[in-house]
């Protein structure tokens, strides 16, 4: 952080949700809500190309690179949630709120969640791979200054 008056927002996220924990249901849910809000922020910030938010290919490259890394982490998170759903499907006392007397139906519902999380993980992995390709393509782009353009036309 070069300017002590400027807040490094990524550092703020680390301060609010330290990687090493503590990890609680509340902190996990709040982190997911934070991600949701950040996606909304990005949706607004990138909604038109005339906005000055991202004017250079290097800016977009940096943003895509961060999203790519986030997507790889998301693959891991979804895999771990899938493992949790697989575990919970065999826990004694698992029940559905609409049919508490049928533990097999509850287990089948958890198994269905496992399958859905598998699909989500595969989709997220494809998303991450596509972002890698975008980053690779963007890494070669820049906007030439007027002198470079005139030189190239000779």
Image (spheres, rainbow, N blue to C red):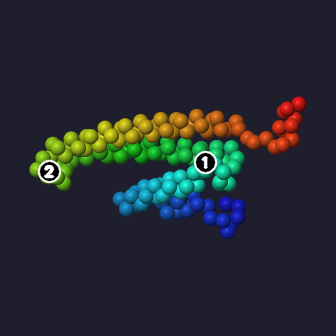
Residue 75: x %, y % from top left: 44, 42
Labels 1 and 2: the sequence-earlier one: 1
Q: Hey, which quadrant is residue 83 in on the image?
A: top left
Horizontal arrangement in the rendering, residue 75 relative to residue 114 (left or right): right
Can residue 37 be seen?
yes
Residue 143: x %, y % from top left: 75, 42
Which residue shows up at 40% across the image and 39% down it?
121
Question: According to the image, label 1 marks what residue?
Answer: 63
Q: Hey, which quadrant is residue 29 in on the image?
A: bottom left
The residue closer to the viewer here, 111 or 4, is 111
Can residue 19 be seen?
no
Which residue shows up at 61% across the image and 50% down it?
48
Which residue shows up at 67% across the image and 48% down it?
59
Horizontal arrangement in the rendering, residue 128 relative to residue 63 (left or right): left
SS type, badge 2: loop
Asked if labels 2 and 1 touch by Cβ distance under 8 angstroms, the answer is no
Which residue shows up at 67% across the image and 68% down it?
5
Which mark identifies residue 99?
Answer: 2
Which quarter shows the C terminus? top right
Residue 18, compared with residue 82, is above or below; it is below
């Amino acid at each position: 952080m070069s300017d002590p008056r400027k807040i490094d927002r990524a550092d703020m996220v680390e301060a609010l949700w330290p990687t090493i924990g503590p990890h609680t249901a509340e902190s996990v849910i709040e982190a997911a809500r934070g991600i949701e809000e950040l996606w909304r922020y990005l949706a607004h910030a990138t909604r038109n190309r005339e906005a000055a938010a991202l004017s250079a290919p290097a800016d977009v490259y940096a943003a895509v690179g961060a999203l790519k890394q986030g997507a790889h982490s998301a693959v891991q998170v979804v895999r771990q949630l899938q493992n949790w759903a697989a575990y919970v499907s065999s826990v004694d006392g698992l029940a559905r709120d609409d049919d508490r007397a049928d533990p097999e139906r509850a287990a089948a519902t958890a198994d269905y969640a496992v399958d859905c999380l598998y699909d989500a993980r595969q989709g997220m992995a494809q998303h991450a791979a596509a972002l890698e390709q975008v980053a690779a393509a963007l890494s070669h782009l820049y906007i030439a200054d007027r002198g470079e353009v005139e030189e190239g036309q000779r």
